[in-house]
Amino acid sequence: MAIPIPSRQLFINGDSAEPLLKKRIPIINPTTEEIIGDIPAATAEDVDVAMQAARSALTRNKGKDWAFASGAVRAKYLRAIAAKIKERKPVLAKLETVDCGKPLSESEADMDDVVGCFEYYADLAEGLDAKQKAPISLPMKTFKSYVIKEPIGVVALIVPWNYPLLMATWKVAPALAAGCAAILKPSELASVTCLELGEVCREVDLPAGVLNILPGLGPEAGASLASHPHVDKISFTGSTVTAVKIMTAAAQRVKPVTLELGGKGPIVVFEDVDIDKAVEWTIFGCFYTNGQICSATSRLIVHESIAAEFLDRLVKWSENIKISDPLEEGCKLGPIVSRGQYEKVMNFISNAKSEGATILYGGNRPKHLKKGFFVEPTIITDVTTSMQIWREEVFGPVLCVKTFTTEEEAIELANDTHYGLGGAVVSKDRERCDRVSKLLQNGAVWVNCSQPCFCQAPFGGTKWSGFGRELGEWGLESYLSVKQVTEYVSDEQWGWYQPPNQ
């Protein structure tokens, strides 16, 4: 049965707003390759309107309505948003699936995480009140000092298509908890659920202009937002190439940025593991979300003494993955998000073969699926460290494999990348896991697992994977400005200068 796609406009100043240039972008279902609706396409003109709404939201009633309201007031709205999303979960999950292709069970889990994230930041917003005017111990009794945490201002939030509503929530929830006003720019490839977030905000009467939602093309909407003179901070999740452009734009006006970018994560498997447990985490770490995970552990580094058995089990587990319409029950691998991304993934596989690697399993369109942007889970062996498949992010269900002999060799292979987002180590030896965790050059390290993510824990990368942290208390702090207030409390003259004669 077809899932009806709501027809929405931009969300600006608490209400629907038709794009000033009346542009729209077709929505293509990646499972059927059919156009199933369209979304509004913002341009620079719409960004200006949204910016005016956002700045007005911060200054309305001298900031008392939002920016300088108590954290408890903002928490009330965040909890109301969470409740509405929980109520709409079945519909939102289906919309997410037909829009970006992820299995329905994953979309349902995403909606649960969205609810949890808004509730978590509601709690942190309330906690902010108690932290205001925190005293600072000074060496001079003639002074007293304290710290105020204030919203950084209007923030531009630019998010990708692999977790459309969840990635938006990772930014929107802490930004609103901090008292910022936000302009959210979802990916043009998957904006449906983010537009539904606008409807939720309208239903809970979120103050006008606090959140504005502008889907659109990167060069028209994203670039205009990133370079806008009245943006106070940019938070971006996406490719390293785009991040360079955003940093360049931000540098012109010395604006802070948080960047969560690509990855080419390692999963290091030692010889003492339970083979099937390690295999399942390996395929989960690379094939979950149809392989479209920035933190994917897509480089398997396995001890040579167990490599043959491990790869044999890896193929058998991969053969057992259900590839189907993502709305079907039991689906574990759906289509790639778009034709362009599908062709990119297939080119990576073709290049790996031409460079001399072996396609141990997969590498093709599943034979039983004649339509849709489907790619079989793919395992590539006989890989050298100079090959494209080892060095570049694929963003699809493609795992490349190398073996190692010593722990030192494994760590060297794991760190042999420009990226540094997620990495994993699998071993029954706790001390070894601790050693390897310290030496892996990643923002997140998973031990005896891959990809678990909790809104209470920080997430972000090193090297080409970006800087700054989302989630946890760190996510909230990134939207706050710290102000020092210091008072001279002595009744005595300061006495630095010679006083004039009376």
Image (cartoon, rainbow, N blue to C red):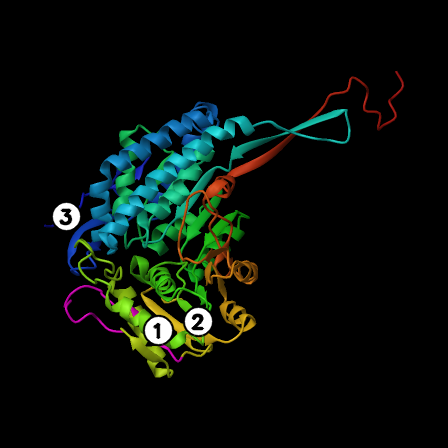
Q: Which residue is mark 1?
A: 311
Q: Are marks 1 and 3 in contact (CB under 8 Å)?
A: no
Badge 2: residue crowd in 10 Å (few <14, some 14–19, many ≥20): many
Q: Are marks 2 and 1 in contact (CB under 8 Å)?
A: yes
Q: Which mark is residue 3?
A: 3
Point out the frontmost of discs 2 and 3.
2
Q: Which mark is residue 325?
A: none
Whether residue 208 is visible: no
User: Does the magenta portion include 370?
Assistant: yes
Give the total number of marks visible in the rendering: 3
- Say which element carries label 3: loop
Q: Which residue is mark 2?
A: 302
The magenta span reads 363-382
Q: Residue 151 at what x, y percent from top left?
A: 50, 35
> What residue is drawn where x is 60% and y is 33%?
483
Looking at this view, name the residue that lies furthest to the right. Answer: 501
